[in-house]
Amino acid sequence: MNELIAVSTGLLAGTITGIVPGAGVMVAMIVASPLLMSFDVLQLLLFYMSLASMVQFTGTIPAVYLGIPGETNSLPAVIEGTKFNKRKMAKLAIGICAVGSVLGSLVAVVITYGLLSVLIEHMTVFFSNATKFYLYLFIIAFCLLVYNKKNVLVNLSLCAIGFMLSVPGESDISSDFRYTFGIEDLQFGIPLIPVLIGFLIVPTIAKMFSSSNSNVFLPSIDIGFCKVIKYFRKKLIASSLRGGLIGYICGFVPGVSTVLSTNASYSFEKKLHPNNPGKLLVASETANNSGQFASMLPLLLIGIPITGSEIVLYSMLVDAGWSPYQFDNVTNNADMLFKQIVPWFVFANIVGLIVAWPLAKKILNLFANSKKYMIAILAVGMLLLNTYLGILDYRVWLYTVCLIVFGCIGLLIKKYETVPLVFMFILGNDMEGVFIRQMLI
Amino acid sequence: MRKLIATVILTLFTTISMAQTITVINSGKAGGSFNARTQMYKDGLEAAGYEVKFENVGKISQAVKMFKASDEPTIMVYANNQVYKQDLFHTEDNFIMAEYQQPLYVCRTDTSKGKIYSLTVAHGKGYDPTLLTKLLGDNIILVPYKNSGAMLKGMLGGDVDMMVNNQGKSFKYIASGKGSCRPSTVLPMMVATVIGKNIDISILRSILFDISLDTPFMEYHTTRKLVRPSSTWEKELAVVQTLEKGYEVK
């Protein structure tokens, strides 16, 4: 019964978190912390697993319909999902994403079961600087060669802007503050949300307004669940399995985990099928779920959290009586993983599949019937979200100034794909540290 | 009847006005030790009858800025390894108590045993390189990492031969079985403290000291094997002030 309570609350929290743009697993964990104080170790793990799984399902809905990334790992879903929406195929996109997500989770469970002893022995390889170094080289090459009709010069400029925006504040390797221009609030860097809104959402809203087609939220063709399964089995299964495998491997990389899973899988698939949004979408979404499971394994097996939300979970686990040192308890942890966590994890994924479908339909109806209002609500919502997060971060004026500046630049460069800029902004600081360490080692 | 109502209202208002308000600044991120300690002090102060105004800042630099600007009764958990970077030193006016202390550890991989030259040493980005070379010799390559967790992962991933890290991460490394660690007698001791302003330090010290002896705090210290320096306020301050000089980056 206790397990069911933990899973149910995790699923509910995940559903809400996925739909609210900008609210990630870490935010949900912090918001839910008063409730979680009464949970035991197993309940905490089940809550987290259910929450993180459900977010992957429902997070696709705003990504596909609104072009808003729920989290930084939703960028491929935004890029490819909106293509489906334009073709009135949003329901199909949600459907294949949901099926792909379930498959991704199952792939991750099967790989883990099959390779458990090898994983335990070699898990720390993924922590090495060299692994990150080569993965980052791959991402840079991807950014330069894929976007904006493969215009390297444009992509290079966007990457450079993104990197420059990541520079102010404290670097990854020095405690000195740099390029703050005497502004104390810049010591903590340029905030993420105004960058995402300015360079991704403002251009999208502008395109919505300038579009000759007033029907921005297109009514989607109704496709039955069985047809989605059939379509998935015939056309997408190979991409999904590839994504699952790549996502699983990348899931172990500390700090970037599922962000890397989705984007690396997306990049790989783009090389194979550059003009097939279905395959690209499914590959990245499958990778997301398998990466999510893989990212939990260092924490579950050897007690090392590798993502921000896991650090919050780790602290709660220790408070609930979990020993912080798990290296001598790996066998018991593996036992707990397969006997007590995996069955509930599979259950959470099946619920996610069932819930994402009708939820998408409800949201679609809402958008299709009141599109102009929805654009206005979206714009005001983003403004409020930016202000609210600014207040929480005690830097509201910087958030506001950044939103205005980046929003204006976003409008000026709206004809370009700004994804390379956003990538480099998010990863730039960590990338710099990795590259410098690689030269030293 | 009127007198009774007036008395009740008066009592109510008197009680409310007597509940002292105190600002507790949380300078730590969720999941970190500063955050966990702050939450426990907050709960303890509320249980002791204080009305706590909780400022969940989450960043040490921003928290220090808020602390310096505060003109209300305010406390904040702090540590002596931050003083130079944040330009906020422990003084008679702000020091409340030392909560625990822990040495820095020097860890080494088993695979690097026998290696003498060009040893790669992971260190936190705030550490003084001259102090590290004084301890470990000139023939080392210093590799900076973002924080203690990143250092541990780098060490486990095989990036470096050695690391200088805090007690918690060093214990984890020992538990991994991939190498050994020893506490350093040369590198400065880290002391976790509580500081405050616009308060009666002796009263707050007494209350916070009691809170830090409560079960949650004791469990927190025991699981992490943290040593508590029990002493007088004057002696604790003197020790903290002496040890914080070791963190000056020359």
Image: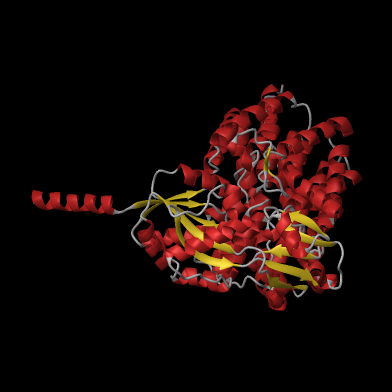
Would residue B242 appear left or right of B50 to someone viewing this image?
right
Provide residue A152's location: percent of width, then percent of height. 88, 33
Provide residue A215's location: percent of width, then percent of height. 67, 28
Asked whether A413 or B216 is in front, the reply is B216
Marks counted in the figure total 0
Would residue A242 appear left or right of A16 to someone viewing this image?
right
Residue at (81% x, 60% y) in the render: B138
The image's colouring method is secondary structure
The image quarter containing residue A141 is: top right
Provide residue B237's location: percent of width, then percent of height. 48, 61
Residue A9 seen in the current view: no
Would residue A9 appear left or right of A433 to someone viewing this image?
left
Would residue A366 appear left or right of B108 to someone viewing this image?
left
Residue at (69% x, 63% y) in the render: B165
Provide residue B215's location: percent of width, then percent of height. 45, 72
Asked whether A8 or B10 is in front, the reply is B10
The image quarter containing residue A4 is: bottom right
Asked whether A284 or B201 is in front, the reply is B201
Residue B132 vs A227, above or below: the answer is below
Residue A320 seen in the current view: yes
Asked whether A100 or A69 is in front, the reply is A69
Residue A58 vs A348, above or below: the answer is above
